[in-house]
Amino acid sequence: MPTRRFADGEVVMGRWPGSVLYYEVQVTSYDDVSHLYTVKYKDGTELALKEGDIRSQSSFKHRKSQSSSSSPSRRSSSRSRSRSPGRPAKGRRRSSSQSREHKDDRKKTIQETNLALLVLIFLFKLDENNTRRYNGEPDSTERNDTSCITLEQKLKPDLEIERVLEQYSLRPRKEEKKKEEIYSEKKIFETVKTIEKASPKTKELEFGGRIGAFLLIFFLPATVFYLLLMCKQDDPSLLNFPPPLPPLESLWEARVFGVFLLWFFLQVLFYLLPIGKVVEGLPLSDGRRLQYRINGFYAFVLTAAVIGTLLYFQFELHYLYDHFMQFAVSAAAFSMVLSIYLYIQSLKAPEEELAPSGNSGYFVYDFFTGHELNPRIGSFDLKYFCELRPGLIGWVVINLAMLLAEMKIHNQSMPSLSMILVNGFQLLYVVDALWNEEAILTTMDITHDGFGFMLAFGDLVWVPFVYSLQAFYLVGHPIAISWPVAAAITLLNCIGYYIFRSANSQKNNFRRNPADPKLAYLKFIPTATGKGLLVTGWWGFVRHPNYLGDIIMALAWSLPCGFNHVLPYFYVIYFICLLVHREARDEHHCKQKYGLAWERYCQRVPYRIFPYIY
């Protein structure tokens, strides 16, 4: 087992990752498993370095003393004038072994410098090649473009030194030759990148490829209708399959479809109001940044005012419960029509505006995943609007309708405690998403996935009609719970929400300003992209702590429904499968994007979602 060379608290010179530059650092700790030193720079930055990237200060000071008096050419000329070649100067006598030692040390430094440059170029090439296909976030723990700016500011003095070396030709000939080779490789890579950028075809198909995408177009609506029909049964056991099917003519009503259209365009009106700030999204493949108006929370408040006005004038909101299946059919039909429109419009879109995940050339697959990345009508972004507005706010309205329906059907003056918990927990989740609306601009739905049937159906049908399954179930199958049980479930939901929100806030704050003094306690692994992977805080606990919080909250939403049937827990099972799929996709992309840095990150954080389990 290798012994450690540097002690805790020792001041040494540490190499900045991805460069050949050394800075004064202090050793804070040593990991016996990974054999990495944790060092702290003068500006408070903490990094994990290998022993090969750390040197003692004595070697640097010795070299500095040799070169500080004069330039090499002046020292050489002064020596030739003052003494003969065989006559050493007074006070500067050194043995032949010391001379060879310093000569070998200098040669080793040049070799390490050249090797580091080659590794840096290789990582740069690898990252750029994969960033073309994936420009999102894994969930991740990335640092945004501000980190590149911070790194550039830190290295600015050293860049000036590089400029001086170039101006006075003080580089060794071998180093100049190596630089020419690197420059040549970089030019070749840029040419290949330009060729690839002209045709960004989707090579890796998800969801089972073309056949899987075709089946999902029918399977997803069938799943929604099955769940809703089961909740209407007196005994919603999964063994009672298939449920009795209603007459087809009863599934459609023009009035219900009109109400759905009214709801959709009301949210469009709220989105177009000139309230809320306008922000820019992440850079697109052509360097452009689209603008988005952040007013989802204002739209929620205005919607609440409209609903409150309707209730004041005694509008029967439980009309949603009475025609719930018809509303689901109307939403599914609208999402299908919208998906067809989106695909037809995407055929006119420029190549650079197509989605990295939906440009396979196969009609069914591209229709399902979404062919165009950011379809817009003028400045109205269809995908961004559907992500949070009609479906998410509609989820809260449906839950409220179920609460009122429960009170009317069971002749209650107050809703049940179970219904209050479900409504309260899910209301908190929706309000949190709308309050932190800007964070959605860094998710894969916005940066990577196109807008096709998958997202259109998911936003307009799956979210409002499946996520409200617990409230819909409780109307026909009331469950009485005690206050101690309610308190325990509430505590569980609070724990899940705390993990979810604090993990996301930690990640988003690190993305915005990684140099923030409030984040000085966070450690990260730098990558060749200029971004960093957090290895402390929640992101040092598991790789996807926000997913862990999501699953805990989903469980808390289902527990008020009791344990008589598994149907209310469908959401938990679905959510676990969904997040495991997303996690596997994130792992694949991050491994391609960050290479060795991601492998180091996985060694530091071995658990993906569930600590000590998975």
Image (cartoon, grey):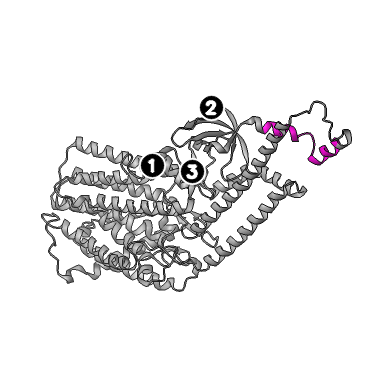
Where the C terminus falls, by quadrant?
top left
- Disc 2 crowd rating (10 Å Cα; few below 14, some 14-19, many 20+) is some
Q: Position of residue 166 (x, y in %)?
A: 73, 49
N-terminal of the pair, mark 2 or mark 3, is 2
Task: Report, in whole angstroms, how far the alpha carbon at label 2 lies from the one at label 3.
Answer: 30 Å
Callout 1 secondary element: loop
| Percent position of residue 399, x then y | 25, 52
Residue 67 shows up from this direction: yes
| Residue 113 within the magenta-colored segment of the rendering | no
Q: Which of 566 and 193 is in front in this view?
A: 193
- Does residue 605 lie above or below 207 as drawn? above
Crowd band around label 1 with a 10 angstrom C-alpha radius: few (<14), some (14–19), many (20+): some
As helix, strand or loop, the secondary structure at mark 3 comes to helix
| Disc with the residue nearer the chain's start (3 vs 1) | 3
Q: Main secondary structure of the magenta part?
A: helix
Nearer to me, 171 or 285: 171
Which residues are the magenta region?
Answer: 60-79
CA–CA distance in space, label 2 to label 1: 27 Å
Q: What residue would you read off at disc 3? A: 510
Image location (x, y in percent) of residue 552:
29, 43
Res 143 label: none
Q: Is residue 27 left or right of residue 436?
A: right
